[in-house]
Every structure is written in structure tokens, then in C-alpha cells.
Amino acid sequence: MLAPTGGAVITIRVQLLEAWDAVKVIADPSTSVATVKARALAVLAPDVPLPGDVVTKLGGFEIRDEAKSLHDAGVQDGSTLLLHFRRRQPIK
């Protein structure tokens, strides 16, 4: 949960494409995309050394400025942020 109690919140889904897994995130709309991405990666792919190697997409389009707030990036209640590796990863 990335929102203070009693404040405005949105509930979104953050999915890591390569893991076929997702997490539910409850966040304040003013939370940055980068913060949501980092928290989701900590759960979905804790072994990813550089979050910059992971692209964040909304509606099929990359969010290039991850310093933007969720609201400013166009994320709404019920949206899904898709994370995927910028480059293909070797299979272990």
C-alpha cells in the first residue's frame, strides 16, 4: 500500500510480463510511476539488478518519464501497468 490512510487512493494492477504474475497496488495518485515500479519489482522480480532494464507501459505505450505521478501519467483506478524487460533475458 502506497497511500496514507484516509487520502485519495486508486487501485491498480502491476504485471511483470516475463513472470506471468501480477500484484495489486493501492496508491495515492500523486505517487511516482518509478516508486510503484520499484515496489512491484521487489515482489515480482527481486533479482533484477537495475530497474532501468525494465520498461513500464500503460495501454501499450511506454511511460518514458517515470518521475511523473500516476495521475500525470494517465493511470486511473483499475488500470494495469505492464512491466517487461527492455532486452530479452537468458533462460536459467
Image (spheres, helix red, strand yellow):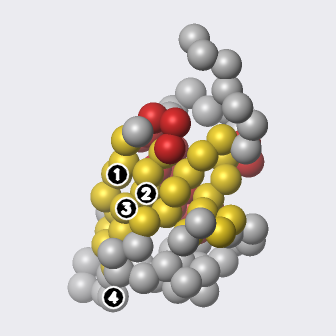
**Label 2, residues with CA under 10 Å away: few <14, some 14-19, many ≥20:** many
* Residue drawn at (40%, 73%) of the image: 79
Look at the numbered disc 4 and give the secondary structure of its residue: loop
| Residue that numbered label 2 is attached to | 14
Residues under numbered marks 1 and 2 in contact, where contact means CB atoms less than 8 Å apart: yes
Identify the mark nearer the N-term, 3 or 1: 3
Residue 74 image-quadrant placement:
bottom right
| Residue that numbered label 4 is attached to | 8
Look at the numbered disc 3 and give the secondary structure of its residue: strand
Q: Amino acid at mark 4?
A: Ala
**Label 4, residues with CA under 10 Å away: few <14, some 14-19, many ≥20:** few
Look at the numbered disc 2 and give the secondary structure of its residue: strand
Q: Amino acid at mark 3?
A: Arg
| Residue that numbered label 3 is attached to | 13
40 left or right, relative to 8: right
| Residue that numbered label 1 is attached to | 23
Q: Can you say whether 92 is above or below 26 in the image? A: above
Residues under numbered marks 4 and 2 in contact, where contact means CB atoms less than 8 Å apart: no
Residue most extreme to the top: 92
**3 or 4: mark nearer the eye:** 3
